[in-house]
Amino acid sequence: MLWATRGHLSMDAPWTGTWSLHVVATYFPDAENRVEGEIDTYPSVWTPHQASQTFDENVTTIERDYGRWLKLMPSVPQALGLVQNWRPKSIGVVS
């Protein structure tokens, strides 16, 4: 489920009865020129909810969780070339 937590979300997804011809999601800023949105998954029925953290708090949480996960990864000799971990320099908005 896509939804705007700040600003407005516009969807263009013409439905054929079986599938969408295309899917375009456009987030528009609010009066303060800010926009935030979520992409949520749900098992059966989506229930709207309030955002529990700000965008910056979410970035901190994701970076912390990713760091924990990365520490648990087994070390693999680089010569094997089996695992290449791509780590972004930062997580956030690309302008």
Image (spheres, grey):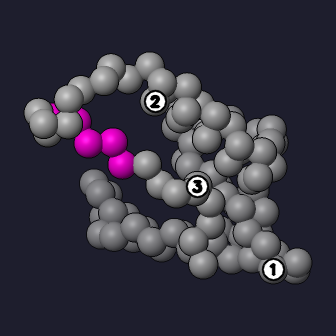
Residue 41 in view here: yes
Sequence-wise, which precedes: disc 2 or disc 1? 1
* Local secondary structure at mark 1: loop
Q: According to the image, label 2 marks what residue?
A: 70
In which image quadrant can residue 35 be found? bottom right
Q: Left or right: 68 with respect to 14?
A: right
- Dominant secondary structure, magenta: loop
Magenta extent: 82-86
Label 2 crowd bin: few (<14), some (14–19), many (20+), radius 10 Å: few
Disc 3 marks which amino acid?
Ile
Residue 10 in view here: no
Disc 2 marks which amino acid?
Leu
Marks 2, 1: nearer the viewer: 2
In this view, 18 is above or below 51: below
Marks 3, 2: nearer the viewer: 2
Label 1 crowd bin: few (<14), some (14–19), many (20+), radius 10 Å: few
Residue at 80%, 38% in the rendered image: 52
Residue 2 image position (x, y, % from top left): 57, 54
Residue 74 image position (x, y, % from top left): 33, 20
Residue 95 image position (x, y, % from top left): 60, 78
* Local secondary structure at mark 3: loop
Q: According to the image, label 3 marks what residue?
A: 91
Sequence-wise, which precedes: disc 1 or disc 3? 1
Q: Are marks 1 and 3 in contact (CB under 8 Å)?
A: no
Marks 1, 3: nearer the viewer: 3
Give the Cα separation between the discs numbered 2 and 1: 35 Å
Q: Which mark is residue 33?
A: 1
